[in-house]
Image (cartoon, rainbow, N blue to C red):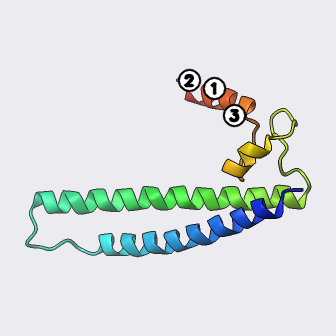
Amino acid sequence: MPSRQLLESLDTRERSLRDKIAERRDALDDAARPADPAGDLADKAFERTRAEVEHDLLELSLRELEAIAAARKRVANGTYGECIECGEPIAPARLEVNPTARRCAECQARHEKVSSTP
C-alpha cells in the first residue's frame, strides 16, 4: 500500500494538471481565432506554431492524467509499486520521484532502450 504522502502527491499533481489543461484549452481557443488580417506571413506562422505547441502540451498533460488514473487503479487492485514487467517491487525512492512509475528502474531502462531502437 502506498504511503499517504504518495497518494497526496498524486492528488496534488492531478489538480495541477487539470488547471494546466484548462489553461491550455483556453490558449488553443485563442490560437484558433483567425489571425489579424493585417498580419504578415511571419505572424501567421507564429500563430500556427503556437497552436501546435499548445496542442502538444495539452496532449502531454492528458497522458499524465491517464498515468495517474492507472496508478490509482493499481492502488485499488493492490498492485501499486510492483513492476509490470518483472513483478518485483519498484524502489520507494523511484515512486517518490515518479508516483506513476509502472516499471522498476532496470525494466524501465530496458523498455526505453528497446523503444528507442529504430
The one of 114 and 23 positioned closer to us in this rendering: 23
Rounded to the nearest whole Å, what is the CA distance between mark 3 and mark 1? 10 Å
Q: Are marks 1 and 2 in contact (CB under 8 Å)?
A: yes
Element on which disc 1 rests: helix
The span from disc 2 to disc 3 (Cα, nearest Å) is: 14 Å
Whether residue 27 is situated above or below residue 104 in the rendered picture: below
Write the residue at 74% across / 44% down: 93
Q: Earlier in the sequence, mark 2 or mark 3?
A: 3
Q: Quadrant of residue 10?
A: bottom right
| CA neighbours of label 3 inside 10 A, class few (<14), some (14 to 19), many (20+) | some
For residue 83, side relative to residue 45 (left or right): right
Residue with the mark numbered 1: 114
Question: Which amino acid type is shown beneath numbered disc 1?
Answer: Val
Residue at the disc numbered 3: 108
Residue with the mark numbered 2: 117
The reply to whether residue 98 is visible in this rendering is: no
The residue at 73%/62% (across/down) is: 69
- Above or below, 46 against 89 in this view is below
Residues packed near mark 1 inside 10 Å, few (<14), some (14 to 19) or many (20 plus): few
Residue 85 located left or right of residue 97: right
Which residue is at the far top?
118
Q: Is residue 118 left or right of residue 93?
A: left
Residue type at mark 2 is: Thr
**Nearest to the observer: residue 92 or residue 51:** 92
Q: Residue at x 65, y 68 (%)?
A: 12
Rendered location of residue 1, percent (x, y): 90, 56
Q: Nearer the viewer, mark 2 or mark 3?
A: 3
Relative image position of residue 89 (x, y in whole percent) = 86, 40
Q: Nearer the viewer, mark 3 or mark 1?
A: 3
Give the quarter of the image for residue 36: bottom left
On the image, which quarter does residue 51 sit in? bottom left
Q: Which mark is residue 43?
A: none
